[in-house]
Amino acid sequence: MPPVAGWLDDLDAVARQSLAFFANRPVVLNLARLAPDRNETNAIIDALKIRNIRVIAVEGVDPAWLDPSLAPLGSGKESGKVVDFPGARAPAQPRAAASSRGSSIIDRPVRSGQTIFHPEGDVIVLGSVSSGAEVIAGGSVHVYGTLRGRALAGATGNPGALIFCRKFQAELVSIDGSYMTAEQTPPDLIGKPVQIRLKNDAIVTDILD
């Protein structure tokens, strides 16, 4: 299935940029537009499993094909982020921002190789985030020093989350699954105090006065 192979390549590219991109994020797989048969469906699910992507439900296929743990998604539920296969895009669906339930304050620098993960609220780092370090929050990320590593806000499904830092030199920033790499960063942001937000599924950056 060539379209699936290309989509998996895109997922692999995202994972190379951030090993924790899908960390603890439940994924709903919608195969309706692809219309795979039973063997193709199982092959797709297996390909995601070996990439440590946690699929909790599958839509658009015969429920009899699925393991009981992958029951069709019930009505009224929404996934935190929609990832489309290549081809025509469906209109974006409205999503409610997830609520935050408290903050985690880190009173020391986050060193290279360390990951801070707080799924229920904001993460506030009073120092800097080194290159090779990650801060992942269900809410917003605040860095009162230099952000050199990776900051992932809204990681459990919150498009209203924000990222703030006093000095921007990030390897990658992400909000609710949309991301911007160092290579994509406008040069005028480097070394500046920055606010990062999401607008229409795109990363928007503002230099703070």
Image: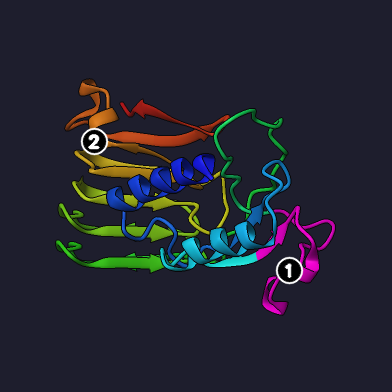
Which residue is denoted by mark 2 in the rendering?
Answer: 182
Rendering coords of residue 155 (x, y %)? 48, 56
Q: Earlier in the sequence, mark 2 or mark 1?
A: 1
Q: Amino acid at mark 1?
A: Trp
Q: How many marks?
A: 2
Q: Amino acid at mark 2?
A: Ala
Which image quarter holds the N terminus? top right
Q: Residue furthest right?
A: 75
Which element is circle 2 on?
Answer: helix
Would residue 117 be found to the left or right of residue 93 on screen?
left
Span highlighted in magenta in the image: 57-78
Instruction: Please report the residue visible at 61 percent of the width from the left and 52 percent of the height from the top.
Output: 80
Where does the image place residue 43, in percent across and percent down from the top left?
55, 61
- Residue 201 placement, left or right of 208: right
Foreground pick, 58 / 208 = 58
Instruction: Say the numbered circle drawn on residue 65.
Output: 1
Residue 33 percent across, percent down from the top left: 71, 41
Above or below residue 40? Residue 161 is above
Q: Who's the residue at 68% across and 34% down the image?
A: 92
Left or right relative to 81: residue 5: left
